[in-house]
Image: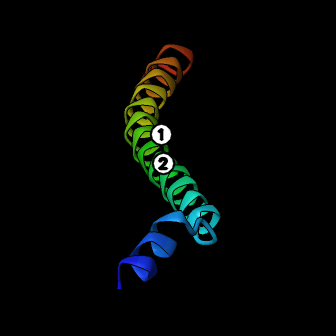
């Protein structure tokens, strides 16, 4: 039984798989964070652009 446990501890055949799983999970996590940051920033940019265009339209075509 001790020999089986030692062989298990020395075996590293699944280590590459674990590395890839961790790497892929971190890339997906960072992509999700980036998506939400861009989405939040684009909303405020949309409001700023709309108000700037409305102000420009008012100055070009006064009522």
- Residue 7 vs 29, above or below: the answer is below
Q: For residue 51, which quarter of the picture?
A: top left
* Residue 38, label in figure: 1
x 38%, y 33%: residue = 47
Residue drawn at the location 49% of the way across and 28% of the way down: 49
Q: Is residue 34 above or below residue 3?
A: above
Q: In the depicted view, which residue is nearer to us: 30 or 41?
A: 30
Classed neighbour count for the residue bearing mark 2: other residues with Cα under 10 Å, few (<14), some (14–19), many (≥20): few
Looking at this view, is 17 or 40 the one in front?
A: 17
Residue 57's tag is none
Left or right of 63 in this view: 19: right
What's the residue at 49%, 59% (across, down)?
Answer: 25
- What residue sits 58% from the left and 63% below the top? 15
- At label 1, counting other C-alpha atoms closer than 10 Å, the crowd grade (few under 14, some 14-19, many 20 or more) is few
- On screen, 48 above or below 27? above
Residue 39 vs residue 32, the one in the foreground: 32
Residue 60, position in %: x, y? 57, 17
- Callout 1 secondary element: helix
- Give the image location of residue 54, x and y in percent: 45, 27
- The answer to whether marks 2 and 1 mark residues whose Cβ atoms lie closer than 8 Å is yes
Circle on res. 35:
2
Task: Give the quarter of the figure containing the C terminus.
Answer: top left
């Amino acid at each position: 039984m001790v020999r089986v446990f030692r062989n298990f501890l020395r075996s590293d055949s699944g280590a590459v798989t674990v590395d890839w799983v961790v790497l892929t999970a971190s890339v997906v996590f960072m992509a999700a964070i980036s998506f939400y940051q861009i989405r939040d920033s684009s909303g405020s940019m949309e409001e700023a652009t709309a108000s700037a265009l409305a102000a420009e339209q008012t100055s070009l075509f006064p009522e």
